[in-house]
Image: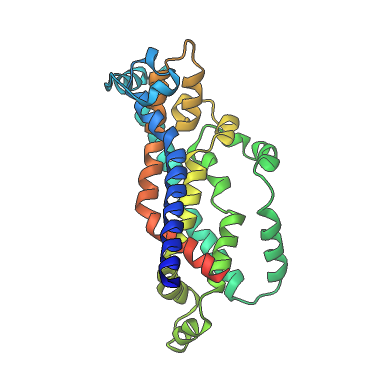
């Protein structure tokens, strides 16, 4: 009798869990669904409230209109906006993974003078928002405005990413690295041949978080970019949305173009991202 009751409770608990997960999944997916559907509807039928979830007329006219609008030197080219965002984000992600992982490894595994102070400094910097240092950076880099260089440089080194790598590297057994050193491997060889392959979840997590932050970066381009040829997608989307009168169907189509790379990147790296979250929970 007790076995039957426990099974019944287990089934009930599972049903409740799946119902809650389904509800929250629907809650988070609804805006994306509305965005996609709205981008396929005529402009005068976009802002229709709940009825917007049940489309009747769908077409690619809004996407054609976006490409048509951004096809000359005055408005800029859509492909150019995409290229700027891709280049800046790629430089920040790849450069950040290299710089921040090496810094995190040095803090987690090596003993050197001033290490404790640097670790404390990194910890403090993680709680300082970018808005607090944006103005000093603006004056420091003002001579390099309207360049890809100035859009990427301030974000390659990240205290938050260094701290994530640091905490992950602390969990790697010392014996593995000691065995590599006995075989004659130096610190760099040990890091790239032993530590990096074991740290795919950490690298995937940092890559996703860095990509999301950089791909959607808006404040810094507003301060540093005035030339149409150097605008990234978030800045141009803001300018396009503010144009009067607003064409909401085309604005939503631009939004879909903007979020599509984010969804692709997350789908590619989600396995390692989930593994990192799970390993963090186990360690905690």
Using the rendered view, name the quadrant where residue 224 is placed: top right
Q: Is residue 77 visible?
A: no
Q: Pinpoint residue 105: horizontal percent, then vertical percent.
A: 55, 69
* Vertical side of 45 occupied by 119: above or below: below
Question: Disc count in the image?
Answer: 0
171 relative to 240, above or below: below
Q: Residue furthest top?
A: 245
Q: Is residue 126 above or below residue 116?
A: above
Q: How is the image coloured?
A: rainbow
* Front-lying residue, 195 or 205: 205
Task: Tell me which residue sits at (46%, 24%) in the image.
Answer: 228
Residue occupying image coordinates x 46% and y 87% = 179
- Seen at 54% across and 30% down, the residue is 225
Quarter of image, res 136: top right
Horizontal side, residue 253 vs residue 170: left or right: left
Residue 233 rendering spot, x and y as whole percentages:
45, 32
Which corner quadrant holds the N terminus?
A: bottom left
Instruction: Decide which of 93, 40 is in the foreground and name it.
Output: 40
- Foreground residue, 167 or 284? 284
Residue 1 vertical position relative to residue 231 in the rendered view, above or below: below
Q: Is residue 127 visible?
A: yes
Task: State which quarter of the image contains the C terminus.
Answer: bottom right
**x and y percentages locating residue 178 in the rendered image:** 50, 85
Tell me where residue 148 appears, x and y as whole percent: 48, 38
């Amino acid at each position: 009798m007790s076995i039957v009751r426990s099974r019944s409770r287990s089934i009930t608990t599972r049903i409740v869990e799946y119902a809650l997960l389904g509800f929250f999944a629907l809650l988070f997916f609804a805006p994306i669904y509305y965005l996609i559907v709205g981008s396929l509807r005529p402009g005068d039928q976009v802002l229709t409230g709940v009825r917007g979830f049940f489309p009747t007329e769908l077409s690619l006219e809004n996407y054609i209109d976006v490409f048509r609008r951004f096809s000359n030197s005055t408005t800029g080219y859509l492909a150019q906006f995409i290229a700027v965002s891709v280049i800046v984000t790629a430089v920040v992600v790849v450069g950040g993974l290299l710089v921040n992982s090496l810094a995190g490894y040095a803090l987690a595994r090596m003993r050197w003078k001033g290490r404790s102070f640097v670790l404390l400094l990194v910890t403090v910097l993680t709680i300082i928002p970018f808005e607090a240092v944006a103005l000093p950076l603006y004056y420091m880099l003002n001579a390099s405005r309207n360049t890809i260089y100035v859009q990427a440089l301030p974000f390659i080194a990240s205290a938050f990413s260094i701290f994530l790598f640091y905490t992950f590297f602390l969990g790697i057994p010392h014996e593995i690295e000691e065995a590599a050193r006995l075989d004659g491997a130096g610190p760099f060889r040990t890091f790239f041949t032993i530590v990096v392959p074991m740290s795919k979840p950490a690298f995937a997590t940092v890559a996703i978080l860095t990509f999301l932050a950089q791909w959607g970066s808006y404040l810094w381009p507003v301060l540093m970019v005035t030339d149409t040829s150097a605008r990234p997608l978030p800045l141009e989307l803001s300018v396009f949305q503010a144009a009067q009168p607003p064409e909401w169907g085309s604005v939503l189509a631009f939004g879909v173009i903007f979020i599509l790379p984010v969804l692709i990147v997350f789908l590619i790296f989600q396995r390692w991202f989930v593994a990192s979250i799970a390993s963090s929970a186990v360690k905690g």
